[in-house]
Amino acid sequence: MECRDAQFYLRWQRHATDELGAEVTTALRQHLAQCPVCAAESQALLAFDKAIARAMKAVPVPPALRDRIRTHVATQRGARLRVQLYRTAVSVAAAVVLVLLGLSIFSSTRPRVDPQMLAELADDQLHRPDDYIQNWLIAQKLPTELPHQFDWELVTHRGFDDVQGLKVPVIVFTTPDGRDFAKVYIFRKDGRFDMRDLHAGQASRASADVYDTPHAVYVIVYTGGPRGLQRFLTNRPPGGPAT
Ligand SMILES: [Zn+2]
């Protein structure tokens, strides 16, 4: 800090003791510690102010004036407090509004667990299994025709399977004894999967047939040997599976 600035701040400090700020106060203190001229000036100013304060205290103040001054100071302080309180209240209110807004958006976009709806859905599945599947296929914007005429009474599940990290629509059929099942995977032709040159698959107890149609590729996986799929159909397949 330069002497010129130090002199300015010294005079400023006399009128507004706590308004210089920590940075300026520190710089000023450092300057006064190194500069004898400004330090002397500071001492002189302090001594002068003290003398004035002493002189003023020595002057008798009429009680009425003293009260008026006291009231005035209290009012000023009260007004400043009210402004601070008001500012705090405004920012608290704003924060509360934000939180409430966030909560309402959050709860309105969050679906609520609905056991009743799930029970009714299971009822539909039991009583009208064909509608249960057809409506779901329509909702998924998938063709309502499957590659075979399946026996809807044997449907136990429709939904999505995780296939190589992607969700794929699937319909699951189970034999009445619960020992064998058939899964119909529906792969949309939307470019998510590479579907060039697909072939049927065969594991020790399961087979996978591939049906390539204009809108989707169906992979039907079933257990129970090479003729296992017949048990889930109401009629003979119209055309043989692609090999
Ligand atoms: Zn100086």
Image (cartoon, rainbow, N blue to C red):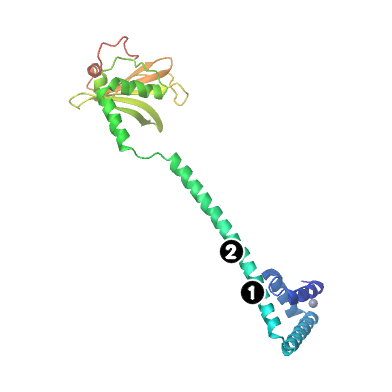
Q: Residue furthest right?
A: 4
| Residue matched to label 1 | 74
Residue at 80%, 75% in the rendered image:
7
Residue at 48%, 43% in the rendered image:
105
Split into quadrants, the picture shows ligand 1 in the one at: bottom right
Residue 104 at what x, y percent from top left? Answer: 47, 45
Amino acid found under the numbered disc labelled 2: Leu
Q: Residue furthest top?
A: 238
Between 219 and 18, the residue placed more toward the observer is: 18
Between 197 and 227, the residue placed more toward the observer is: 227
Q: Residues within 10 Å of mark 1 (few under 14, many from 20)?
A: few
Q: Secondary structure at mark 2?
A: helix
Residue 81 at what x, y percent from top left? Answer: 61, 67
Residue 26 falls in which quadrant of the image?
bottom right
Observer able to see residue 29: yes
| Image label count | 2
Amino acid found under the numbered disc labelled 1: Ala
Q: Residues within 10 Å of mark 2 (few under 14, many from 20)?
A: few
Observer able to see residue 201: no
Residue 130 at what x, y percent from top left? Answer: 30, 20
Q: Which mark is residue 165?
A: none
Mark 1 vs ligand 1: CB below 8 Å: no
Residue at 30%, 35% in the rendered image:
116
Q: Is residue 9 left or right of residue 72?
A: right
Quarter placement of the N terminus: bottom right
Residue 141 at what x, y percent from top left? Answer: 42, 22
Residue 12 falls in which quadrant of the image?
bottom right
Residue at 80%, 81% in the rendered image:
37
| Residue matched to label 2 | 85
Q: Earlier in the sequence, mark 1 or mark 2?
A: 1
Q: Is residue 38 above or below residue 117?
A: below
